[in-house]
Image (tube, helix red, strand yellow):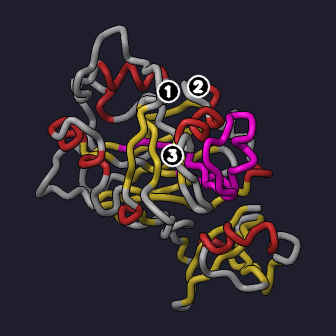
Amino acid sequence: MKLVRYSKNGETRIGRVEDGAVRALDPAQTDMVRLIEDFDNLRDRLRPAGDPIPLENVTIEAPLPNPPRNLFCVGKNYREHAREFSGSGYEAGAVKGAEVDEYPAVFTKPATSIVGPGADVLLHPEITSEVDYEIELALIIGKPGRNIPRERAYEHIWGYTIVNDVTARDRQKRHKQWFMGKALDTFCPMGPWIATADEIDPENLDLETRVNGEVRQRSNTRDLIFDIPSLVETISSGLTLVPGDVIVTGTPAGVGIGFDPPRFLKQGDVVSMTITGLGTLENTFR
């Protein structure tokens, strides 16, 4: 099922998306993390309630605004993007011919950066002039585990959504690591909904980014360097993953720094990101 957090008349609820409309869940749900934790017990009792409301008549919120901790993010996980990043001059210590890493590059993005579809993303002109976009498939953990072997990884995944891993490239380069360029307020648009794992084939999803209607990124999750099972295995090594944890799997080629000259986002730009089965995440940069 596709689950969305939405607000109407000042009340926020979780609903089920069907045919371009949303219906609240019965029994009523308001906290996505609690729903994930209790999902096995609730699944057979959750029913849509009330009349369907067209999605355009509600405000869609970030589906998971309160994950239990920072998001786990993976860098350089599509080959063409690894090459464009290495050749852009923005990767500290880049070595020609060694663009693809032997192990996943994992960093974190604070949960405080999460905003929903339609929310403004701040350009923060007082501290950066090089804001970039990155479409990414994000997975949500539903079953806790530590040292999860890759062959059991999908047993621990509850669902999937879209994340725009917005990045201040100048800060990323200047600080020689990724957190400072990715941690700014509003730098993690998420949504529009979460599709539960039974609805999605994560190994064959098309991804597309448009900036003001122009296609910038287009790829498929078949092109991941480190696939989803290997990411779950790596990140859970010695670290217990808990329900509501988010793993963001990396972006394909076509980001702003991949152009010559780079094409950074500016005031009023509209970025739309679409992944098969997960809808479209659209935000305006201000």
Tell me if I can see residue 265 in this picture. no
Taking the image as shown, residue 16 lies to the left or right of residue 265, namely: right
Identified by mark 1, the residue type is: Tyr
Sequence-first tag of 1 and 3: 1
Locate the N terminus by quadrant: bottom right
Read off the magenta span: 133-162
Residue occupied by mark 3: 248
Residue found farthest to the right? 44
Q: Determine the secondary structure under disc 2.
A: helix
- Identified at 16% across, 46% down, the residue is 129
Q: Considering only order in the chain, which callout, 2 or 3, is on the residue closer to the N terminus?
A: 2
Viewer-proximal residue among 7 and 34: 34
Q: Is residue 23 left or right of residue 221?
A: right
Q: Is 26 within the magenta?
A: no
What's the residue at 56%, 30% (across, down)? Answer: 219
Q: Nearer the viewer, mark 1 or mark 3?
A: 3
Q: Is residue 60 above or below residue 179?
A: below
